[in-house]
Amino acid sequence: MATEEKSLNFLEQIIEEDLKNGLSQDKLRFRFPPEPNGYLHVGHASAICLNFGLGIDYQAPVNLRFDDTNPAKEEQEYVDAIKKDIEWLGYQWANECYASDYFQQLYDWAVDFIKKGKAYVDSQTSEEMAKQKGTPTQVGTNSPYRDRSVEENLDLFERMKNGEFEEGTHILRAKIDMASPNMLMRDPIMYRILKKHHHRTGNDWCIYPMYDWAHGESDYLEQISHSFCTLEFLPHRELYDWFLDQVYDETKVRPKQREFARRNLSHTVVSKRKLLQLVEEKHVSGWDDPRMSTISGMRRRGYPPMAIRNFAKTIGIAKRTNLIDVSLLEFCVREELNKTAPRVMAVLNPVKLVITNYPEGQEEWLDAENNPEEEVMTYRKVPFSKELYIEREDFQEEANKKFFRLTLGTEVRLKNAYIIKGESVIKDENGNITEIHCTYDTDSRSGSGTEASQRKVKGTIHWVAVNHAIPAEVRVYDRLFTHESPDGNKEIDFKEFINPNSLEVITGYVEPSLQSAKNLDQFQFQRLGYFCVDKDSSAEKLVFNKTVGLRDTWAKVESKE
């Protein structure tokens, strides 16, 4: 793949070493193995980019395999959502597989284990099992059922499969070593009784394989060459290999498990259990709430898929877990949207601006560039008239020399339009400004080529013409958690750190070109940030989500703190 050893991460080095040692390039095969018990989050996005990225780099197939071995928590909804997320990120799997595809083969192998004395049915309670398993510093003791005869084990296991026993009465365990220093090797569970409806196999099975048993054997059946997992699976590698030893045929590829570190993201949680809690307790509107760390939440917020891929590439692969600041992800989002998002004008905190010397009833349609980053510049028309909305914070009656926007007696340029000069204000009975009156320089229209149009003024402000302004609901999002590591302290409930101000809903005005904007369309509201159309939007009521600001405002806040 790569010519320079230095440019390879440690997983690529493992692959390169295997190729040098005789593994044929056409035997390379990777997989992404999600459990369909929730929506994928930003941590999964990194794993997706890793595995599918290796597939692209090495021109090797990548399987999407659902680890659907626990019907108590799995649903078709999650399967569909996972597929949508991977496709949205721009990847395509070679084969869509399920652990349930292999239930019969896994069962048949388990029967062989029993016949060879390598597995037995245990009838202890979970409490009794926990006691006899020992501790990391104390060896375990054998189950009283460990020496059941092959015939009795075969009989009990078949009756477990046939649904004759209640959940929790029996399990199938591998017979390995109760004195192993690795507690996972102390006769691990291979099957448990679960009388639950499975989203694919229905009620065909009353027993289901455990992850450790199903995972490596599924890799083997699919002839996966490299099975990359996160670091918590490092102690499982010994068991992964032991299970493979029992079924491995030397004429086939033997999968190799290797581990990489999770990259946690600040101000988020990425535990599916905790994300589900946020959804079920209505702290958020759903799995795709734009404040969530889920891929569907990031999509709805307006994050471009390429920004997430660039983020994964930037943080890379590591051997040690660490916390990545969410501002790096936001930087990648900004970088991508700066290249791709059309520029439009919107006013989110409006005050009326009246150009007193502009002819009553007159209207102009001015040229405005869509994106200065385009190779070939394109333009749209925006309406201009006597009455406009501008941002309230773009005007001060009196201001110091560092304020470069509109004040009384000073000039600014209206973006794509004219130079104006502040003249007076109208206030209500409470002293609040309701109108700003100004005059305009008739010869100063942007792009007209006149001497006045080329006159330099210190500030440029955006605007929307009142008679063409379209009201829009704008959802301004902040970080969902105030703490950088909300679930980092086991003594404190992560929900204690939920930011009560993580969502502000306001009504603003947008230019008329946005009337036809569709779900997920992305824009830069000039001078305000990047926004996208929400799925709640309609022709009658436009709804926008704030994706990210034009710059990192959190860095300033956190440096003050």
Image: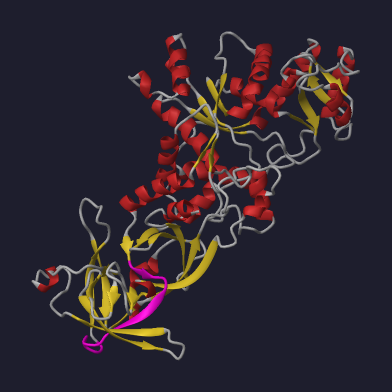
Tell me the quarter of the picture where residue 8 sits. Answer: top left
Q: Is residue 550 magenta?
A: no
Q: Position of residue 539 (x, y in %)?
A: 45, 70
Q: Nearer the viewer, residue 195 or 274?
A: 274
Q: Nearer the viewer, residue 240 or 217?
A: 240
**Farthest residue toward the left?**
451
Query: Is 515 displayed left or right of 203 in the figure?
Result: left
Residue 561 placement (x, y as % from top left): 50, 53
Residue 196 lies in what quarter of the image? top right
Q: Position of residue 53 (x, y in %)?
A: 43, 31
Asked if one can make out residue 1 in the rendered structure from this viewpoint, the answer is: no
What residue is at 46 percent from the left and 22 percent from the top?
Answer: 10
Residue range (magenta): 345-361
Query: Residue at 38% across / 55% down in the picture?
Result: 551
Image-based side of 450 in relation to 286, left or right: left
Q: In screen coordinates, is 42 left or right of 451?
A: right
Q: Is residue 346 magenta?
A: yes
| Residue 557, visible in the rendered structure | yes
Residue found at x 56% / y 55%: 480
- Answer above or below: position of 325 versus 376: above
Question: In x, y percent, where is residue 95?
Answer: 53, 31
Name the residue nearer the viewer: 473 or 529: 529
Q: Residue at x 24, y 89 (%)?
A: 360
